[in-house]
Amino acid sequence: MRIFNLDHRLALGVGHDRAADVEKASDGRFGADVQAVYERWDEFAGWARAYDGPGELAVEPGRLGPPVPRPPQVFAIGLNYRDHAAEAGLALPERPLVFTKFPASITGPHGNIARPAGSVDFEVELVAVIGRRAERVPAARAWEHVAGLTAGQDLSERELQSAGPTPQFSLGKSFAGFAPIGPALVTVDEFADPDDIAIGCDVNGEAMQRGRTADMIFTIPQLVEHLSAVLPLLPGDLIFTGTPKGVGIARRPPRLLQVGDELTTRIEGIGEMRHRFTHPALRASL
């Protein structure tokens, strides 16, 4: 099952490139608000899997917004791939390294992102979306609490990230548009192995990152267990699960994002995002 934010309305994928408007198809049982569906995820998923009606809407890149537009909480995991830890010259963590991206940084899978001053870097990431409240959930049951997966970029301004006597991870990674997600939320049952998915990104057509989520140090179930032991995970929360090697700052010479660059993000089974970086006077497109 795939769901979209299509023209700012909740849509259910039908076939390859079509979708049904959920409010209309469900005769008002579910509304058009994309974010609201996560509070009723189990009920919605049951209806959606039984839906056999038409897909009257074309799924076109310019019409897509973030499949989770207003997440209550956005968690992100640092150094969660062995090869990325190696390129950073850091030891493998013994437990997940957690920071946050502020929800105002969320944007959709296509459009422009204003490039702030400083050193702007890319980090392709698989993003897990919570569909059922998770509190002290063991890893063995964690997938039951995940609505689905989507593609993300943990964009980072490295100078602000590392400024001061202690790092400013959350602030340096939360400029407007610095958390693009999409193009769809895909339920876990759609993947042959949700713990082994190919991910990657290109800049101006040149390959930058290539990896597989099987190389994560901490799996999505382990992350859900770790986070939910500290605080409740809420329906619609996001977990950015870390990035493989190839980030711009680690290259020699560094390859940082510039005005005019196009960043293409791809995740197997989910799809593609495209973003162009603009002069900072232009706001990120939603």
Image (tube, grey):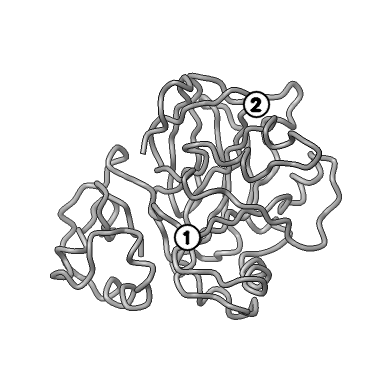
- Percent coordinates x, y for residue 227 in the rendering: 64, 68
Q: Earlier in the sequence, mark 1 or mark 2?
A: 1
Which residue is labeled 1 in the image?
72
Q: Nearer the viewer, residue 51 or 154?
A: 154
Q: Nearer the viewer, residue 177 or 44?
A: 177
The residue at 32%/40% (across/down) is 61
- Percent coordinates x, y for residue 201 in the rendering: 56, 38
- Percent coordinates x, y for residue 76 in the rendering: 62, 53
Q: Amino acid at mark 2?
A: Ser
Q: Is residue 253 above or below residue 14?
A: above
Residues tagged 1 and 2 counted as in contact (Cβ below 8 A): no
Q: Is residue 259 above or below residue 126?
A: above
The residue at 63%/38% (across/down) is 172
Which residue is labeled 2 in the image?
119
Q: Nearer the viewer, residue 106 or 208?
A: 106
The residue at 69%/56% (across/down) is 98
Looking at the figure, which quarter contains the N terminus? bottom left
Looking at the figure, which quarter contains the C terminus? top left
* Rendered image quadrant of residue 77: bottom right
CA gap, disc 1 to disc 2?
28 Å
- Percent coordinates x, y for residue 231 in the rendering: 61, 71
Q: Is residue 61 above or below residue 255?
A: below
